[in-house]
């Protein structure tokens, strides 16, 4: 594991957002959802592709708060432009457990 500086860490914008829409993504090479996430007034609404279909269905995701990185450049994923990175933990079987707050918080709050 390589170390990063405090300044490197401080430059990563990890913020709370609420998933407001989930769509299928049949064009993805690996099963994924297209998520629309509200990160509050300062950041706004962003879209992301997330390979979380093993553990999460569409109905369970709408209204769920997640931790996302909002200051990465947009990334083209097939026909979809992903505008943020939804964070999670990859398990040994390849399934992803989302990083989430344990209590509701305001959208847009930054992890510190």
Image (tube, helix red, strand yellow):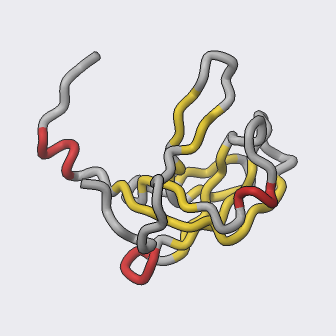
Position of residue 84 in the picture relative to residue 106 (left or right):
right
Q: Position of residue 74 (x, y in %)?
A: 50, 57
Outermost residue, left side: 6
Q: Position of residue 111 (x, y in %)?
A: 31, 56
Q: Nearer the viewer, residue 52 or 101?
A: 101
Examine the image and state in which quarter residue 38 appears: bottom right
Quarter of the picture containing the C terminus is bottom left
* Residue drawn at the location 43% of the way across and 68% of the way down: 105
Examine the image and state in which quarter residue 3 appears: top left
Q: Nearer the viewer, residue 46 or 105?
A: 105
* Residue drawn at the location 72% of the way across and 69% of the way down: 21
Q: Position of residue 47 (x, y in %)?
A: 61, 64
Examine the image and state in which quarter residue 93 appears: top right
* Residue drawn at the location 54% of the way across and 74% of the way down: 45
* Residue drawn at the location 83% of the way across and 46% of the way down: 27
Outermost residue, right side: 26
Quarter of the picture containing the N terminus is top left
Count every numbered label the image shows and give the total. 0
Position of residue 76 in the picture relative to residue 58 (left or right):
left
Q: Nearer the viewer, residue 75 or 93?
A: 93
Position of residue 14 in the picture relative to residue 90 (left or right):
left
Outermost residue, front side: 103
Q: Position of residue 36 (x, y in %)?
A: 64, 67
Relative height, residue 74 to residue 95 (above, below): below
Relative height, residue 2 to residue 27 (above, below): above
């Amino acid at each position: 594991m390589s170390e990063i500086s405090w300044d490197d860490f401080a430059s990563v914008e990890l913020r709370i957002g609420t998933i407001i829409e989930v769509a299928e993504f049949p064009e993805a090479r690996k099963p994924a959802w297209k998520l629309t996430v509200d990160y509050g007034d300062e950041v706004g609404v962003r879209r992301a592709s997330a390979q979380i279909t093993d553990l999460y269905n569409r109905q369970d995701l709408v209204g769920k708060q997640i931790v996302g990185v909002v200051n990465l450049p947009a990334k083209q994923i097939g026909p979809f432009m992903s505008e943020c990175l939804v964070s999670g933990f990859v398990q040994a079987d390849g399934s992803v457990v989302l990083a989430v707050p344990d209590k509701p918080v305001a959208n847009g709050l930054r992890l510190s």
